[in-house]
Amino acid sequence: MPKRYLYIWFGYLAPDRLVKINPELRNGPFLLYAAEHGRMVARAVSPALEEEGITRGMVVADVRAIFPDVKVFAAEPAAEEKLLKDLAEWCFRFTPTVAVDPTDGLILDISGCAHLWGGELPYVRTIISRLRKGGYSVRAAIADTIGAARAVARYGNELIVEAQKQSDALALLPPVALRLDDVTLQRLNKLGFRQIGQLLSIPRANLRRRLGEMLLYRLGQALGTERELLKPVQPTPVYLERLPCLEPIRTAKGIEIALERLLEMLCARFFREGKGMRTGVFKGYRLDGETVQISIGTNRASRNAAHLFRLFELKIVELEPALGIELFTLEATLVEDVSEAQEALWSMPGSNQTAIAELLDNIAGKVGAQAVHRYLPQEHYWPERSVKEVSTLGEQPETEWRTDKPRPLHILSRPEPVEVMVALPDYPPKHFRYKGEIINIVCADGPERIEQEWWLQSGPPRDYYQVEDENGARYWLFRLGLYGDRKPEWFLHGFFV
């Protein structure tokens, strides 16, 4: 199959990115600058400013002298590089092979792809139209070689260069279209070469002697006599499934069907490889170029498609299809091994751990993962240090929970001081003041003395009391230190149900 390439040039990539962030800049004069030899130099200018004769490379001070009201922003090469890579990934819906041409171009190997859109012309027009609707200024061209497609897209007026006709398409273009260095371009200008066609009739030996090997190499790449290799963009996620749509999807039911199919494909792969999903992202690529997504997390690795679907289903309402979604992807961003014993739990009756994991996943999907916590005991006497928070159900306790003494359901992470009135030494208080409110105690139990481990820190012990007020509310209070050593300090440390 003969090779065909599509080159897409984003002539105003940096300004377009800024306009998408700040829509008020649209159609206005502004530029992006970078420091160069102690001066601020324009790295990109808006179309409105370019129409006034301001070009890339001008000193910002000179531009401000001409247009005092021009808006100036710092260039962000890293953000522009990321945007170009994101656009390359967006193009995967049109071809599996896409490469980035720094700093504002994309190269698509479209061999065998265009017929799916009815030919090369509707194919390239579809891509251009969607990118322009997304807010990008683009030019594009299709040719047999990367060099010819790039040259025509940037400096020509054709959309399609017919097969084996690249020399005709290049003939009227300026030499700068060949990706030559500045020194070679200056030599060509001095020698009077204004079009590439003037070079085609000169013997190669003469061109090599006067202008160097690079000119022949770039000319050969454009004409197809020199091979040019692509470095395709590789999708970073390993566990990723894609589902393109013949027609844009706008309904919740259509989104659910797409999600079910993607889960079936991804979970089938998990079964083959003994893996399971811990976190996943479901994305929809819309016609307007925007991407919408929802994500989930599980307490343990899962490859049960029905369970994972229920977690995603809770968030489908967050997806805005707008004009329609044309491509769905499901990516497992965190994957872990799944044991055979764990997998068997799905079909066993009374599998408590699995039921708990499913319940926690459903709760987290509704109220947020940050609202669900799991605690295990630790070997510490101090109550606030006797428990630790863990993130998964798989982690097992290193010690047993203490059940010989009552403990409140809610323990404060830091004891809060309270004012008390004590009738007798070593007795619980008659009342205490907490957050400005006087709480009268009608019954109490205690004390329970708790001391800190001597190898951690030396300090006074705590005497804990369970107290109940006249409304039936129960509190956990303690006195710090031994009575009589000094003025006693009292603290509230928890609440019983």
Image (cartoon, helix red, strand yellow):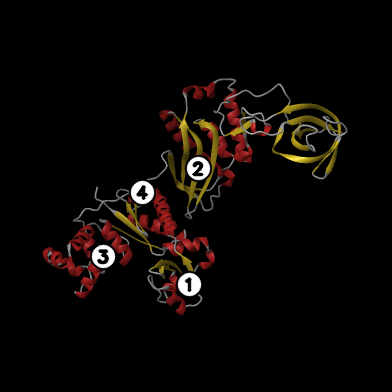
- Neighbour class for label 3 at 10 Å: few (<14), some, many (≥20)? few
| Residue that lies at the very extreme toward the front in this rendered image | 485
Q: Which residue is mark 4?
A: 233
Compare residues 402 and 84 and report the one nearer the observer: 402
> How far is disc 4 from disc 3 in space, using C-alphas?
26 Å
- Find disc 1 in the rendering and name its residue: 29
The secondary element bearing badge 1 is classed as loop
Q: Position of residue 281 (x, y in %)?
A: 50, 42
**Which of pointers 4 and 3 indicates the residue nearer the eye?**
3
Amino acid on which disc 2 is placed: Phe
Residue matched to label 2: 282
Cα distance in 3D space between marks 2 and 1: 39 Å
Kind of element beneath mark 2: strand
Instruction: Tell me if 186 is positioned left or right of 277 in this view.
Output: left
Say which of marks 1 and 3 sits in front.
3
Say whether disc 2 or disc 3 marks the residue closer to the N-terminus: 3
Q: Is residue 399 left or right of residue 271?
A: right
Q: Amino acid at mark 3?
A: Asp
Residue annotated with mark 3: 181
Please indicate, yes or no, whether residue 161 appears anywhere in the rendered image: no
Pinpoint residue 24: horizontal percent, then vertical percent: 54, 67
